[in-house]
Amino acid sequence: MAPDYGETFALWREGAAGPWHDFTHHAFVEGLGDGTLPRSAFLHYLIQDYVFLVHFSRAWSLAIVKSETLEEMKICAGTVDALVNHEMSLHVKTCAAEGINEATLFAAQEAVENLAYTRYVMDAGLQGDFLDLMAALAPCVMGYGEIGLRLART
Protein backbone atom coordinates (compact mmCIF):
# COMPACT_ATOMS: atom_id res chain seq x y z
CA MET A 1 0.00 0.00 0.00
CA ALA A 2 1.33 3.41 -0.99
CA PRO A 3 1.69 6.17 1.63
CA ASP A 4 -0.94 8.88 1.69
CA TYR A 5 0.74 12.00 0.35
CA GLY A 6 -2.58 13.62 -0.43
CA GLU A 7 -5.02 13.68 -3.29
CA THR A 8 -2.84 15.61 -5.75
CA PHE A 9 0.14 13.30 -5.44
CA ALA A 10 -2.13 10.25 -5.65
CA LEU A 11 -3.42 11.58 -8.97
CA TRP A 12 0.13 12.20 -10.20
CA ARG A 13 1.14 8.68 -9.15
CA GLU A 14 -1.89 7.21 -10.90
CA GLY A 15 -1.24 9.27 -14.05
CA ALA A 16 2.29 7.87 -14.29
CA ALA A 17 1.56 4.40 -12.90
CA GLY A 18 3.96 2.47 -15.14
CA PRO A 19 6.99 4.76 -14.85
CA TRP A 20 6.29 5.27 -11.14
CA HIS A 21 6.28 1.52 -10.53
CA ASP A 22 9.49 1.16 -12.56
CA PHE A 23 11.10 3.89 -10.43
CA THR A 24 9.97 2.58 -7.04
CA HIS A 25 10.69 -1.07 -7.93
CA HIS A 26 13.92 -0.58 -9.89
CA ALA A 27 16.38 -3.50 -9.81
CA PHE A 28 18.73 -1.34 -7.71
CA VAL A 29 16.00 -0.77 -5.12
CA GLU A 30 15.07 -4.45 -5.05
CA GLY A 31 18.73 -5.49 -4.69
CA LEU A 32 19.17 -3.01 -1.87
CA GLY A 33 16.07 -4.39 -0.18
CA ASP A 34 16.93 -8.07 -0.45
CA GLY A 35 20.67 -7.72 0.13
CA THR A 36 21.79 -8.78 -3.36
CA LEU A 37 23.03 -5.36 -4.50
CA PRO A 38 26.79 -5.50 -5.11
CA ARG A 39 28.78 -3.26 -2.76
CA SER A 40 30.43 -1.53 -5.74
CA ALA A 41 26.98 -0.54 -7.06
CA PHE A 42 26.05 0.83 -3.64
CA LEU A 43 29.26 2.88 -3.43
CA HIS A 44 28.72 4.23 -6.94
CA TYR A 45 25.21 5.22 -5.87
CA LEU A 46 26.49 6.95 -2.72
CA ILE A 47 28.97 9.00 -4.72
CA GLN A 48 26.33 10.00 -7.27
CA ASP A 49 23.80 10.66 -4.53
CA TYR A 50 26.27 12.97 -2.78
CA VAL A 51 26.62 14.96 -6.02
CA PHE A 52 22.84 14.86 -6.36
CA LEU A 53 22.40 16.15 -2.80
CA VAL A 54 24.62 19.15 -3.55
CA HIS A 55 22.25 20.18 -6.33
CA PHE A 56 19.15 19.09 -4.43
CA SER A 57 20.22 21.33 -1.54
CA ARG A 58 20.63 24.21 -3.94
CA ALA A 59 17.12 23.60 -5.28
CA TRP A 60 15.69 23.62 -1.75
CA SER A 61 17.63 26.83 -1.11
CA LEU A 62 15.96 28.30 -4.17
CA ALA A 63 12.65 27.19 -2.67
CA ILE A 64 13.32 29.54 0.26
CA VAL A 65 13.57 32.40 -2.24
CA LYS A 66 10.43 31.25 -4.07
CA SER A 67 8.43 30.73 -0.86
CA GLU A 68 5.31 32.82 -0.41
CA THR A 69 4.87 32.37 3.33
CA LEU A 70 7.10 32.32 6.38
CA GLU A 71 5.99 28.74 7.10
CA GLU A 72 7.13 27.63 3.63
CA MET A 73 10.46 29.38 4.22
CA LYS A 74 10.93 27.58 7.54
CA ILE A 75 10.16 24.18 6.03
CA CYS A 76 12.53 24.74 3.12
CA ALA A 77 15.29 26.08 5.39
CA GLY A 78 14.88 23.04 7.64
CA THR A 79 15.17 20.79 4.60
CA VAL A 80 18.38 22.49 3.48
CA ASP A 81 19.80 22.08 7.00
CA ALA A 82 18.83 18.38 7.07
CA LEU A 83 20.39 17.76 3.66
CA VAL A 84 23.63 19.73 4.05
CA ASN A 85 24.37 19.12 7.72
CA HIS A 86 23.00 15.63 8.25
CA GLU A 87 22.20 13.51 5.19
CA MET A 88 25.35 14.43 3.29
CA SER A 89 27.49 13.67 6.35
CA LEU A 90 26.13 10.12 6.36
CA HIS A 91 27.42 9.71 2.81
CA VAL A 92 30.79 11.16 3.84
CA LYS A 93 31.12 8.76 6.80
CA THR A 94 30.09 5.68 4.81
CA CYS A 95 32.39 6.54 1.92
CA ALA A 96 35.29 7.42 4.24
CA ALA A 97 35.13 3.88 5.60
CA GLU A 98 35.75 2.74 2.00
CA GLY A 99 38.67 5.17 1.49
CA ILE A 100 36.67 7.82 -0.40
CA ASN A 101 37.10 11.30 1.10
CA GLU A 102 34.70 14.24 0.91
CA ALA A 103 36.81 16.16 -1.60
CA THR A 104 36.58 13.18 -3.95
CA LEU A 105 32.81 13.04 -3.44
CA PHE A 106 32.38 16.73 -4.17
CA ALA A 107 34.57 16.54 -7.29
CA ALA A 108 32.96 13.36 -8.66
CA GLN A 109 31.86 13.38 -12.30
CA GLU A 110 28.09 13.71 -12.36
CA ALA A 111 26.33 10.91 -14.26
CA VAL A 112 24.14 11.97 -17.18
CA GLU A 113 20.96 10.72 -15.49
CA ASN A 114 21.80 12.69 -12.36
CA LEU A 115 22.61 15.78 -14.38
CA ALA A 116 19.33 15.55 -16.33
CA TYR A 117 17.16 15.45 -13.22
CA THR A 118 19.02 18.03 -11.14
CA ARG A 119 19.14 20.55 -13.98
CA TYR A 120 15.46 19.95 -14.75
CA VAL A 121 14.61 20.70 -11.11
CA MET A 122 16.72 23.86 -11.07
CA ASP A 123 15.26 25.02 -14.38
CA ALA A 124 11.71 24.43 -13.12
CA GLY A 125 12.54 26.45 -10.02
CA LEU A 126 14.30 29.28 -11.79
CA GLN A 127 11.67 29.69 -14.49
CA GLY A 128 8.59 28.89 -12.44
CA ASP A 129 7.13 29.66 -9.07
CA PHE A 130 7.24 27.84 -5.75
CA LEU A 131 4.63 25.30 -6.86
CA ASP A 132 6.56 24.49 -10.05
CA LEU A 133 9.66 23.83 -7.97
CA MET A 134 7.78 21.67 -5.47
CA ALA A 135 6.28 19.64 -8.34
CA ALA A 136 9.77 19.04 -9.72
CA LEU A 137 11.13 18.03 -6.29
CA ALA A 138 8.16 15.81 -5.40
CA PRO A 139 9.07 12.64 -7.34
CA CYS A 140 12.36 12.29 -5.49
CA VAL A 141 11.02 13.15 -2.06
CA MET A 142 7.85 11.09 -2.34
CA GLY A 143 9.47 8.28 -4.28
CA TYR A 144 12.20 7.66 -1.75
CA GLY A 145 9.64 7.92 1.03
CA GLU A 146 7.50 5.30 -0.65
CA ILE A 147 10.50 3.05 -1.34
CA GLY A 148 11.70 3.36 2.25
CA LEU A 149 8.31 2.51 3.71
CA ARG A 150 7.92 -0.50 1.40
CA LEU A 151 11.40 -1.84 2.16
CA ALA A 152 10.92 -1.31 5.90
CA ARG A 153 7.87 -3.59 5.76
CA THR A 154 9.85 -6.49 4.25
Image (tube, rainbow, N blue to C red):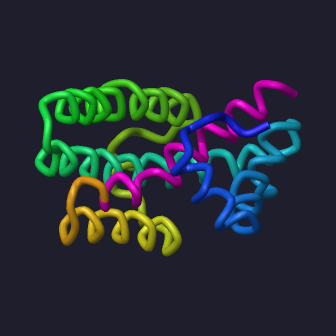
> Is residue 1 depicted above or below 62 in this figure?
above
80 sits to left or right of 102: left
Image quarter where the C terminus lies is top right
Q: Residue at x 75, y 48 (%)?
A: 29
On the image, the x and y values in percent for residue 67 come to: 16, 44
47 sits to left or right of 84: right
- The residue at the far front in this view is 7
When asked about the image quadrant of residue 149, the answer is top right
Q: Residue at x 20, y 60 (%)?
A: 129
On the image, the x and y values in percent for residue 139 come to: 52, 54
43 sits to left or right of 106: right
Magenta stretch holds residue 97: no
When asked about the image quadrant of residue 60, the answer is top left
What stretch of residues is rendered in magenta?
Answer: 132-154
39 or 32, nearer to the observer: 32
Q: Residue at x 38, y 24 (%)?
A: 86
Image quarter where the N terminus lies is top right
101 or 46, nearer to the observer: 46
